[in-house]
Image (tube, rainbow, N blue to C red):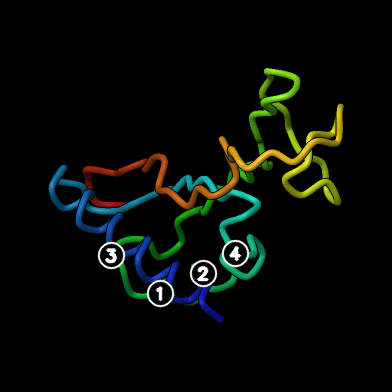
């Protein structure tokens, strides 16, 4: 399950940012996951909960924003969201579109930090 290595990398990155900001705990982590990223959101959630035990992120909420595939269609001259089953084809004109504008993302979007000891 490569989601465990993704979760470990997220935790490492989040802890580094939190320590630099002088935080004592991380309350929540928001990530953006594209449909073409190869990451299964449910598996990432499970891996994150397991991997965060004993870290600054223990008990933190993982918020996953799932991003659909968006392409630019040169025939229609428009950016389009691609529904399932239309991989790299325009859902309007059915032309092949290799210009992927969204869907490959896997990024740490934001952190909610606590700068004092938790009760």
Q: Secondary structure at mark 1?
A: loop
Residue at numbered disc 4: 38
Q: Please provide percent x and percent y for residue 63.
A: 55, 48
Spatial CA span between label 1 and label 3: 13 Å
Residue under the point 68% across and 41% down: 68
Q: Secondary structure at mark 3?
A: helix
Mark 1 against mark 3, which lies toward the viewer? Answer: 3
The answer to the question of whether label 3 and label 4 lie on touching residues, with beta carbons closer than 8 A, is no
Residue at numbered disc 3: 12
Residue under the point 34% across and 51% down: 26
Q: Identify the mark at residue 53; answer none if there is no mark.
A: 1
Mark 3 against mark 2, which lies toward the viewer? Answer: 3
Residue at numbered disc 2: 49
The answer to the question of whether label 1 and label 3 lie on touching residues, with beta carbons closer than 8 A, is no
- In the image, residue 65 above or below residue 12: above
Mark 3 against mark 4, which lies toward the viewer? Answer: 4
Residue 35 in the figure: left or right of residue 57: right
Spatial CA span between label 2 and label 1: 7 Å
Q: Secondary structure at mark 4?
A: loop
Spatial CA span between label 3 and label 4: 20 Å
N-terminal of the two: label 1 or label 4? 4
Q: Identify the mark at residue 39; answer none if there is no mark.
A: none
Q: Please provide percent x and percent y for residue 86.
A: 83, 46
Mark 1 against mark 4, which lies toward the viewer? Answer: 4
């Amino acid at each position: 399950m490569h989601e465990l290595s993704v979760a470990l990398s997220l935790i490492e990155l989040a802890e580094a940012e939190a320590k630099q900001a002088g935080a004592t705990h991380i309350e929540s982590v928001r990530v953006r996951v594209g449909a073409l990223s190869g990451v299964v959101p449910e598996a990432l959630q499970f891996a994150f909960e397991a991997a965060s035990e004993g870290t600054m992120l223990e008990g933190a909420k993982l918020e996953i924003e799932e991003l659909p595939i968006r392409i630019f269609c040169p025939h229609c001259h428009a950016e389009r969201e691609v529904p399932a089953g239309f991989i790299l084809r325009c859902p309007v004109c059915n032309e092949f579109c290799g210009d992927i504008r969204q869907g490959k993302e896997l990024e740490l979007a934001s952190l909610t930090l606590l700068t004092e000891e938790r009760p």
